[in-house]
Each structure stands twice: as C-alpha cells, then as structure tokens.
Amino acid sequence: MIYTYKELLSKYGSQRKIKQKVLDNTYFSISRGIYSNEYNAINEQYIKKRFPEAILTGQFAFYFHNLTDYIPKTFEIATLRNATRVKCKDISQSFQEKKIFSIGKTNINGVTIYDLERMIIELFRFKSKYPTDYFMEIVHNLRNQSDKIDLFKIKEYLKAFKRGYKFYKQIYEVIF
C-alpha cells in the first residue's frame, strides 16, 4: 500500500515515529513524501499518489485493457505540456496539449487511465512507435472485443485531434 507523508503523520502523530518505522523496515521511502509497506512499490497506485494529475497511457494501458499479454517494464503517463518533468527510470512521460489531454480520461479501480476508445486512437496515432507484431496483437484483440467499442465516441474524440478524419478511416478499416 502507498502512503503520503501526511497520511502517516496523521496515523503516527510525529515525524520521529515515521522515521523509526522506516528504520524498522515497516515502511520504505519510495520518493520524497511517498512511503510504502512494500520494498519495491512503483505501481499504478504510486503514480496516482505521486502524480495525481497524470493519466496512465501507452503499453500499460493496453495491458490494463486486456489487449496484450506483454507486461511493460515502465509506466507511461500523459501530462499537460506545462507539467514538471518526471525524473524516474520506471516512468516515461508524454506531454499533451490541454485540448486533448482529458479526452477519454476515466477512473477504473482507482487508477486514472484513458478509456478503450482513447487508447484505440493512441494506437493509431503512434503506430510507428510499436513493433508490427505488437500492433497486430492489439488489433486482433480489438477485433475480438469490437462489440464493446463505441464507434460514436471515437468519432467525437477525433474531432479534437489533428487529422482526425484520417485516423477514423484507418480505425474503421482495420478494426471493423
């Protein structure tokens, strides 16, 4: 479980008691102001506590939506363009414009992540970034889940993107 300094302070009452718990290996300091009761706890809960405005995207989101079996080594997050740069080897960050940042943002099981329709758009926006077999695995799994995909929602989302019509045409031809 992930805790902030304020949460532990309200639980134990003093900084000295928190330091003692860290020395006793009851809690581990993951980063400044973030603690965990697990030794290596960089996970989606950590990202939610450490970067509350960030949205999980990329390979982790494809895995989260059961579109691939590949477990990513890093977490990909999307932030606004004016956000502070994240300096963590386990997290890769992409900066997005304000008008497209919150499109498709959803909260699933306490994790802030892009919904399936937004991830389809992301797949086609950055398809050159992914290996062909990885791309085709996701497309195959999307075809199997085509009854869950809201095509109208994709069309609405694409109105905010540059060359949205081009992406819609590709998405429709490849998945449906």
Image (cartoon, rainbow, N blue to C red):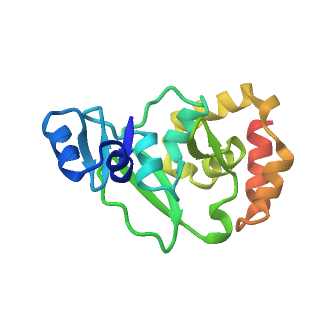
- Relative to 38, is 155 above or below? below
Q: Position of residue 126 (x, y in %)?
A: 56, 53
Q: Nearer the viewer, residue 115 or 144?
A: 115
From the viewer's perspective, is 108 left or right of 40?
A: right
The residue located at (31%, 60%) in the rendering is 87
From the viewer's perspective, is 26 left or right of 124?
A: left
Q: Position of residue 144 (x, y in %)?
A: 73, 25
The residue located at (36%, 61%) in the rendering is 86
Q: Position of residue 40 (x, y in %)?
A: 27, 35
User: In which quadrant will I find the N terminus?
Assistant: top left
Report the label total: 0
Q: Residue reaching furthest bottom? A: 82
The residue located at (69%, 32%) in the rendering is 142
Q: Nearer the viewer, residue 141 or 104?
A: 104
The residue located at (32%, 49%) in the rendering is 9
Quadrant in which residue 111 is drawn: top right
Q: Residue reaching furthest front? A: 13
Q: Nearer the viewer, residue 118 or 22?
A: 22
User: In which quadrant will I find the C terminus?
Assistant: top right
Q: Residue reaching furthest left? A: 23
- Relative to 26, is 169 above or below? below
From the viewer's perspective, is 57 left or right of 2?
A: right
Q: Position of residue 89 (x, y in %)?
A: 29, 50
Q: Residue reaching furthest right? A: 152
